Image: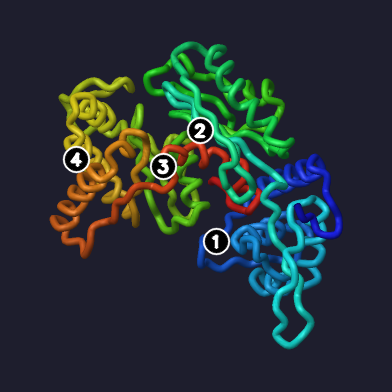
Amino acid sequence: MGWGTRKAHPRGAERGAANRVKECRVAGIRAAGPGGAVSGVNLLSLRSHNAALLLDLLRGAGRAGMSRLELAERTGLTPQAVSKITARLREDGLIAEAGRQASTGGKPRTALRLVPQAGHAVGLQVDRDELRAVLVDLTGEVVAERRAALDLGAGAEAVLDVVVDEAQVLVEGPSGAAVLGVGVAMPGPLDHTHGVLHRVTGFPEWDGFPLRDALARRLGVPVVLDKDTNAAALGLAVGGEVGAFAYLHLGTGLGAGLVLGGAVHRGARTGAGEFGHQVVQLDGPPCPCGNRGCVEALCLAAVARGDIDGAARVLGEGAANLVGLLDIDLVLLGGRTVTAEPERFVRGVGAVLDTRARREGASSPVPVRIAPGGARAVAEGAAQLLLAPLFGRTQD
């Protein structure tokens, strides 16, 4: 493995990468999406922002890398500033030389590249009946994966035992891989800022439980907690989805992750995205949330009786309400129930959106498609809760 002129110790890389995560979180900088302009500033107080810009560009450049001059041109930083920052990143083991670029008349330039193995993150999807865990490198590539049965109603200690056992295998990592921390995604509602669960739909006994701190104590690494739909939406945004979009997740429950203005939208009280609990039938079946006729209750009831097309139509009505309210550009569908019948859900939801668009005189309906990532989308998004700040992509 190439580390440039200096071979960094894996634990040194871990400490350096962890410091970058901390710095970028403090900076709170939002990077532009693909194709958008990025700009650096030559101020010492914002050096973490500038480092994040460079890391994000090098991640996008792949193994071919990018020269210091190209980095300066893309960010607006001076060549001197780029040299200082890249020297520090090389010391931390985050970047390395990628060879010489072909000469265009002058001295061949040395390209730099991201070192994917310099840091890893664990992503956990804690569902009502299953745990899915992934270990990803700095590029987001999955290098290990685990699954286990889970009963969210079994009590905090029993659930923590399963989560810790499975996560610990990945935290220890293959070949001593440096792990920056663990991202946890699970059904809401919850408070992602303080890492505390609220009345998880169907499991009110979790209300007030400090899951983030409990896991951090037992695993001995930083932990970030968020709703499953928000984590998946973040992962999609980091992976290249642009514009305003909604990720609708139908599995053991139903929720939405919203990306507006290039960032995951959570609302002032972190309650945004409780999509499944919009009431669409006043005298409908009771929902575990306490209301009647929620989209979630109607969808799950239709799925239970084998009426997939009916479930898709209900989901489509909820999606059409969301499109009308927020004027979003794209609807992405995910979750185990959707991925079991992807074509029928895309067709059913799309038909409702098409009908609404024609009725309202819209030029074209909002497109609907299956979210990339499949069954691992939420767990991979959970890992991005740790990695995204390293590259200047904040979650809110």
- The quadrant in which residue 358 appears is bottom left
Q: Residue 374 bears which disc, if any?
A: 3
Cα distance in 3D space between marks 4 and 2: 27 Å
Give the residue at mark 4: 313
Q: Is residue 109 above or below residue 248?
A: below
Q: Earlier in the sequence, mark 3 or mark 4?
A: 4
Q: Is residue 187 above or below residue 218?
A: below
Q: Position of residue 144 (x, y in %)?
A: 58, 37
Give the residue at mark 2: 185
User: Looking at this rendering, what residue extends furthest in the left direction?
Assistant: 359
Give the residue at mark 1: 32
Q: Earlier in the sequence, mark 1 or mark 2?
A: 1
Q: Is residue 182 above or below residue 263?
A: above
Cα distance in 3D space between marks 2 and 3: 16 Å
Q: Say left or right for 307 vs 208.
A: left
Q: Residue at x 47, y 19 (%)?
A: 150
Q: Residues within 10 Å of mark 3 (few under 14, many from 20)?
A: some
